[in-house]
Image: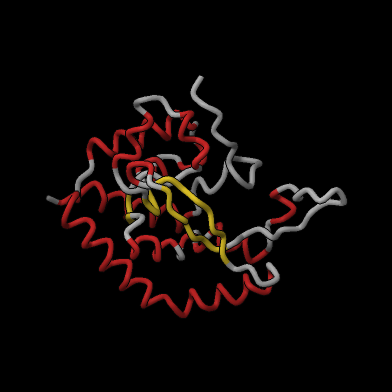
């Protein structure tokens, strides 16, 4: 009953309430990023959700679109803007995903939505991460985030799918707040973005 009724209801009501309260912060960040990225405040990308249904995730755009002389995008570390670095370190770049939760594409807690081209790379066990809605935060995020391997992340995702409960979700939310406050596991050491998944060995 929790998974199918109470959790979706809680997600909608909580996301709507939180977004209403922090809308001034949302507006201020949007204006700053709008200026830093020359009119592009949001990062939109197609991601697979529950049952591999594709939806569009929305986040604050933390990197600009600067290119080299050949027209190729510069490395991530050179495109990360100062305001983008700040909102990423404080996890404020996740705020727009509240709109995804309100729409019903995402939950507060669940496996993080990854890229569509990863779908053929999952083994049968890893595919189980798509049996529930993806989340803004998840068990893998509070247990290591970008400091653990892809295989370990997927193992933790599947464990969450099997053991999902109200108390586990509350625990994950509180652990997420701690991670954000102490800026733990934001990125793999030396990396601006984590390395892409290339399939399990």
Q: Nearer the viewer, residue 51 or 183?
A: 51
Query: Residue visible at 27% across and 38% down?
Result: 161
Q: Is residue 82 left or right of residue 151?
A: right
Where residue 87 appears, x then y in whole percent?
56, 63
Q: Residue at x 56, y 58 (%)?
A: 88
| Residue occupying the far left of the picture | 1
Q: Please, is residue 121 above or below residue 139 in the view?
A: above
The residue nearer to you, when weighing 84 against 49, is 49
Q: Can you give x and y, in whole percent of width and height, for residue 179 in the image?
A: 43, 52
**What residue is shown at x 50% (from left), y 45% (from top)?**
185
- Lateral position of residue 96 relative to residue 49, left or right: right
Q: Can you tell which quarter of the image residue 60 is in?
A: bottom right
Q: Position of residue 33 (x, y in %)?
A: 62, 70
Q: As rendered, which of 49 and 97 lies closer to the eye?
A: 49
- Residue farthest toward the front in the current orientation of the protein: 53
Q: Position of residue 112 (x, y in %)?
A: 42, 46
- Residue 36 falls in image quadrant: bottom right
Which residue in the rendered view is the most extreme toward the bottom? 24
> How are the residues colored?
secondary structure
Q: Quick check: 117 above or below 15?
A: above
């Amino acid at each position: 009953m929790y998974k199918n009724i109470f959790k979706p209801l809680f997600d909608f009501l909580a996301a709507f309430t939180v977004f209403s309260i922090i809308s001034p912060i949302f507006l201020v960040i949007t204006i700053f990023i709008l200026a830093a990225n020359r009119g592009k405040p949001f990062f939109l990308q197609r991601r697979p959700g529950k049952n591999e249904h594709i939806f569009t995730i929305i986040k604050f755009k933390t990197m600009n679109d600067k290119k080299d002389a050949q027209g190729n995008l510069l490395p991530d570390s050179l495109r990360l803007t100062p305001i983008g670095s700040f909102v990423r370190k404080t996890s404020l770049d996740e705020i727009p995903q509240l709109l995804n939760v309100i729409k019903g594409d995402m939950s507060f807690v669940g496996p993080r939505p990854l890229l569509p081209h990863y779908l053929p790379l999952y083994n049968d066990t890893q595919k189980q991460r798509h049996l529930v809605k993806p989340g803004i935060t998840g068990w893998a995020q509070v247990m290591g985030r970008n400091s653990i391997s892809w295989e370990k992340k997927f193992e933790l995702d599947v464990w969450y799918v099997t053991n999902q409960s109200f108390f586990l979700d509350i625990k994950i939310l509180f652990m997420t707040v701690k991670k954000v406050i102490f800026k733990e596991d934001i990125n793999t050491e030396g990396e601006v973005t984590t390395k892409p998944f290339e399939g399990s060995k």
